[in-house]
């Protein structure tokens, strides 16, 4: 992909002819633009899939809630053993792992966000359906709806021009491990490669490009032929790219020897060696802890996995800080569900619903999102209710990390979803270019009892939308969509039942949010 | 002007343009029997899907028969013959004392050295078991092992999971049970698997006790093994778990094993004797007087399965028919032909969930023989490795290592849902390994074998006919004239046609040429398809 060249041509053509968002284009030289876009281009997302359904209640411990000790008589983490990292926030001691840098330290250093109550409406308690929901980014409770591609696969397949006929120089995504995950699949073809051993990949990958052109006829045979052909071409092309990055890259800290930590080590080395992939996917399985998840000394499968998770992320982060690429990388954990609050009879927990998610890196707005789970108000299955729709963090990735817009979020997720704000949005040159500016939104009178007005100072001309979302982040209604000129904007609030909402004003795609409460 | 859009192209426009492509091409023909005598292409197609690939001499013998004749022949007798050779687990000798050791010892709590030794012994036996089944598959004249593999991919257990190992002897017993059940009543198979020792251990049934329910197996019985998701409530899961309390797996010599090691048993004291409400049907409470293994197995466990098959009969029939379609016909989950699926499911119900008539219907249907599904299936690693040995007539002694490298570890799928299948089989990780295996196996052909292989094609002296026949034999769909020319060039190493006759007179030269042709064909994307 020759983006660099393409960009200089378009900017050169545009300079002097356009004024957008009130900022004349010639305020930026093409070189400036190039540098800024390049910086944005370097951003990387690491997805850590914790398969099996991680037990959120034994990850971030509700140690101040006596109910927790009642429902988990044999597997609760005693308050005196839980690690208190902030008022009312306790970690499982395994997260304070033996590694020099770990999730506890990262939280204390402001590099970790803990998202409580991540989940979705009408939760599926099936590993596979729920994994598909998480990886596809579609929450469909209809089991007949086939979920066949991933939210990142769709996003990048739509963003990389000419894909898959023209393959970018570096793989868009790299999965450490075997069969490629649905997360990195799109209907146009896989956006990623699966990689276990760069040296072996290099030895075996050379010269694998097929001698044949893609088939033109659209038959089942033709489709699968073209699919295999694309993988063969990717194997050939990327085996040397990966090898180069691997040879050039390094790790500057010692990593523990276990499969998960070593996956993180490989990711660090490839980034360090200059591989320009946007997404890395690593896998940590075993969270389906129906049986003997933890003994009275807090040993067992679940603590073991948490220890690995914390060590893997912490060591990677330490490496990234030393090598200077920490600002370019954020990561998130995904797990298909949490566990049932009540322990079962086998010192384990059965499938549950909402859970806890970690988002890490220098680019996060660190802290704790949401309240500790309410253990006195379960859903009809006896599971913890969710507070945030899981797709909110995906919207963050699109809009606040990869430089996408609300329109991207809507088109990729086929739904309007409000970013959680867990990633820091840095104002970029594109914002000025497109007139994307944030505004101060006021609702008066507030709380809303009868009549109220949403008000802000519109600084630039552009398209304005006023949307109401639920606090979990799902779209409820649009109050206003129109062009607006600079000046004071006022939009009346109407048609909302009593309850808590989030009001979102977007100016040319830049979102500004304010909480909104209606008491009728 | 929005520069970003200009840079990347709009997401929306690309999605729309794809919608038209997403309509699957129509498959002609339904469940009605395909009665035309089979051509060579038909025979090759039937074997590639229902069995593994087939040798050229064997394929030619079947030409002209009807689909029904060949399918019946492949299904074989309902009762499976004893596998030959028999499975032999290696003896375990203590590395320190060199003495034979009791291999049923529990490694938990043992010293580290013993633990490592026991687990190492298990891993060795897992490899032995894997190679044993892969060898049976290669040599099987029926589809006994192929169907058992299919059912092992349905009633999932894993050799290695949650940082622990399953004793391979347990997996072996499960394999033998499914081998016997492979063509019988699907309810009976469900019953056998529900109280199977490996399954009780793998999905936590052995921990499921009165007052301490463990829902794991109860849920998967419906979600993954019978109805599919969406046909039961969470209440049904909880009630089913109560029905299934009391069954125990036997794994080690420090645990009770009233029926012998590796055989499941019933612990009456751990069974929940209360009444259960499952899918709107009451399973009556019982007392200590009728809480025996025999009574609970029939009146509760089998009853539970019968309720599922009665109340959710449409769901079960569709679910199993769909599984078969994906495995044997086309594994793209979004492209299962709904009309044909309904016909297949209706047949399954009409035959009271007996598997043999269902298999017969599927493999003799006009749908199955339609040209539009030929070449659409991505070979699984097992199909690739077993099939290529059959095609070339060359044996590989350690096939499990190869399928493992291609992301299919025998008896050890990634999750309880089994292998995800379809395109997940081909990645930048596995594809280079497939090419490596093909190269290796072709190189392993002796000159004698390569020359014999050439003579398996009746028109082998006519170079054009020969090249065409080899592509028909190895590739699923007829290839273009351009590709045939390319392959002929590979065979002749760039020399004129008449040199083929000269090569045929010199076995080493003919062998080398043959291997060049095979390697050229193995590079083609459709060599991965069947």
Image (cartoon, coloured by chain):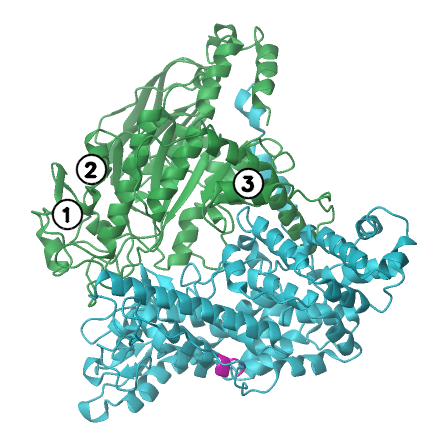
Chain colours: A green, B cyan
Q: Pick the residue in front: A27 or A281.
A: A281
The structure residue drawn at horizontal position 20% and vertical position 76%, both measured from the top left corner, is B210
N-terminal label among 3 and 2: 2
Report in which chain the residue with disc 2 lies: A
Say which residue label 3 marks.
Answer: A202
Say which residue label 2 marks.
Answer: A104
Crowding around mark 2 (Cα neighbors within 10 Å: few <14, some 14 to 19, many 20+) is many
Determine if residue A115 is in view.
Answer: yes
Say which residue label 1 marks.
Answer: A62
Measured along the vertical axis of the image, is residue B367 above or below residue A146?
A: below
On the rendered image, what quadrant is the N terminus of chain B found in?
Answer: top right
On the rendered image, what quadrant is the C terminus of chain B found in?
Answer: bottom right
Q: Quadrant of residue B224?
A: bottom left
3D distance between C-alphas at marks 3 and 2: 38 Å
Q: Pick the residue in front: A281 or A511.
A: A281
Tag in front: 3 or 1: 3
| Element type where label 2 sits in the image | helix
Q: Is residue B180 highlighted in magenta?
A: yes
């Amino acid at each position: 992909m020759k983006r660099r060249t393409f960009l200089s041509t378009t900017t050169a053509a545009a300079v002097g002819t356009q004024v957008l968002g009130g900022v004349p284009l010639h305020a930026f030289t093409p070189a400036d633009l190039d540098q800024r876009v390049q910086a944005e281009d370097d951003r990387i997302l690491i997805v850590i899939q914790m398969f099996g359904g991680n037990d959120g209640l034994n990850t971030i411990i509700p140690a101040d809630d006596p109910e927790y000790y009642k429902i988990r008589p044999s597997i609760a983490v005693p308050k005196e053993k839980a690690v208190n990292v902030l008022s009312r926030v306790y970690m499982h001691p395994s997260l304070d792992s033996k590694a020099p840098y770990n999730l506890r330290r990262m939280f204390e250093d402001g590099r970790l966000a803990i998202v409580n109550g991540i989940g979705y409406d009408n939760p599926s308690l099936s590993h596979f359906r729920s994994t598909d929901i998480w990886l596809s980014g579609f929450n469909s409770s209809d089991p007949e709806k086939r979920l066949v591609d991933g939210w990142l696969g769709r996003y990048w397949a739509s963003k990389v021009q000419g894909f898959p006929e023209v393959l970018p120089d570096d793989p868009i995504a790299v999965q450490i491990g075997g069969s490629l995950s649905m997360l990195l699949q799109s209907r146009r073809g896989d956006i990623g490669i699966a990689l276990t051993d760069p040296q072996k990949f290099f030895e075996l990958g050379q010269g694998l490009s097929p001698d044949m052109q893609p088939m033109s006829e659209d038959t089942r045979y033709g489709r699968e032929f073209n699919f295999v052909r694309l993988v063969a071409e990717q194997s050939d092309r990327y085996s040397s790219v990966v090898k180069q990055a691997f040879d050039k890259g390094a790790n500057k800290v010692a990593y523990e020897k276990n499969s998960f930590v070593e996956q993180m080590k490989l990711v660090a080395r490839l980034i360090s060696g200059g591989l320009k992939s946007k997404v890395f996917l690593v896998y940590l399985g075993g969270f389906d802890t129906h049986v003997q998840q933890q003994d009275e000394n807090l040993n067992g499968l679940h603590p073991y996995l948490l220890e690995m998770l914390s060590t893997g992320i912490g060591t990677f982060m330490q490496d990234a800080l030393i090598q200077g690429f920490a600002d370019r990388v954020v990561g998130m954990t995904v797990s298909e569900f949490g566990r049932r609050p009540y322990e079962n009879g086998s010192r384990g927990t059965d499938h549950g619903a909402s859970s806890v998610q970690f988002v890490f890196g220098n680019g996060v707005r660190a802290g704790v999102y949401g309240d500790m789970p309410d253990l006195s108000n379960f859903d009809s299955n006896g599971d913890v209710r969710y507070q945030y729709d899981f797709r909110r963090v995906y919207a963050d990735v699109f809009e606040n990390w990869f430089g996408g817009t609300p329109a991207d979020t809507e088109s990729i997720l086929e739904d309007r979803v409000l970013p959680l704000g867990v990633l820091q949005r840095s104002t970029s040159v594109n914002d000025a270019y497109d007139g994307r500016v944030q505004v101060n939104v006021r609702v008066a009178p507030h709380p809303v009892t009868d009549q109220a007005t949403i008000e802000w100072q519109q600084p630039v001309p552009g398209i304005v939308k006023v949307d109401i979302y639920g606090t979990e982040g799902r779209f409820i209604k649009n109050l206003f969509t129109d062009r607006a000129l600079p000046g004071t904007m006022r939009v009346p609030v109407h048609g909302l039942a009593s309850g808590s909402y989030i009001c979102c004003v977007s100016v040319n795609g830049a979102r500004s949010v304010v909480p909104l409460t209606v008491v009728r | 002007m929005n520069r970003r859009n200009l840079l990347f192209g709009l997401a929306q426009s690309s999605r729309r343009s794809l919608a038209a492509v997403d309509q699957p091409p129509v498959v002609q023909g339904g469940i009605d029997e395909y009665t035309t005598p089979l051509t060579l292409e038909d025979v090759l197609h039937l074997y590639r899907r229902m069995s593994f690939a087939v040798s050229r001499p064997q394929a030619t013998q079947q030409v002209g028969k009807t689909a029904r004749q060949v399918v019946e022949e492949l299904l074989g007798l309902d009762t499976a013959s004893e596998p030959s050779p028999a499975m032999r687990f290696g003896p375990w000798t203590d590395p320190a004392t060199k003495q034979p050791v009791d291999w049923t010892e529990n490694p938990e709590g043992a010293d580290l050295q013993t633990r490592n030794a026991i687990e190492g012994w298990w891993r060795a036996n897992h490899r032995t078991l894997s190679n044993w089944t892969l060898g049976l598959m290669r040599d099987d004249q029926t589809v006994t092992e192929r169907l058992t593999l299919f059912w092992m991919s349905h009633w999932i257990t894993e050799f290695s999971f949650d940082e622990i190992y399953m004793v391979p002897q347990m997996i072996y017993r499960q394999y033998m049970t499914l081998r016997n059940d492979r063509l019988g009543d699907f309810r009976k198979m469900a019953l056998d698997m529900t109280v199977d020792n490996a399954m009780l251990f793998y999905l936590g049934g052995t921990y499921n006790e009165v007052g301490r329910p463990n829902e794991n197996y109860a849920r998967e019985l419906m979600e993954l093994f019978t109805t599919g998701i969406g046909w039961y409530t969470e209440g049904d899961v909880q009630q089913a778990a109560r029905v299934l309390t009391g069954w125990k797996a036997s794994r080690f010599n420090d645990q009770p094993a009233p029926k012998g090691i590796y055989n499941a048993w019933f612990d009456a004291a751990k069974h929940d004797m209360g009444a259960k409400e499952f899918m709107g049907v009451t399973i009556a409470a019982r007392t200590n007087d009728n809480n025996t293994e025999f009574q609970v197995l029939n009146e509760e466990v089998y009853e539970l399965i019968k309720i599922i098959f009665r109340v959710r009969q449409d769901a079960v029939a569709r679910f199993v028919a769909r599984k078969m379609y994906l495995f044997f016909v086309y594994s793209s989950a979004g492209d299962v032909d709904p009309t044909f699926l309904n016909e297949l499911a209706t047949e399954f119900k009409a035959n009271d969930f007996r598997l043999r008539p269902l298999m017969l219907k599927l493999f003799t249907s006009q749908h199955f023989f339609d040209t539009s599904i030929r070449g659409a299936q991505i070979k699984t690693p097992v199909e690739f490795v077993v099939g290529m040995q059959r095609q070339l007539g060359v044996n590989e002694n350690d096939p499990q290592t190869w399928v493992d490298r291609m992301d299919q570890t025998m008896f050890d799928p990634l999750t309880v849902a089994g292998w995800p299948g379809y395109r997940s089989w081909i990645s930048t990780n596995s594809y280079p390994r497939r090419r490596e295996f093909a190269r290796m196996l072709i190189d392993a052909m002796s000159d004698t074998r390569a020359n014999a292989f050439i003579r398996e094609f009746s028109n082998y002296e006519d170079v054009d006919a020969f090249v065409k026949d080899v592509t028909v034999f190895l590739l699923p769909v007829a290839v273009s004239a351009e590709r045939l020319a390319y392959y002929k060039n590979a065979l002749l190493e760039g020399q004129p046609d008449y040199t083929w006759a000269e090569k045929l007179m010199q076995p080493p030269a003919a062998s080398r040429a043959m291997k060049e042709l095979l390697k050229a064909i193995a590079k083609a994307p459709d060599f991965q398809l069947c």
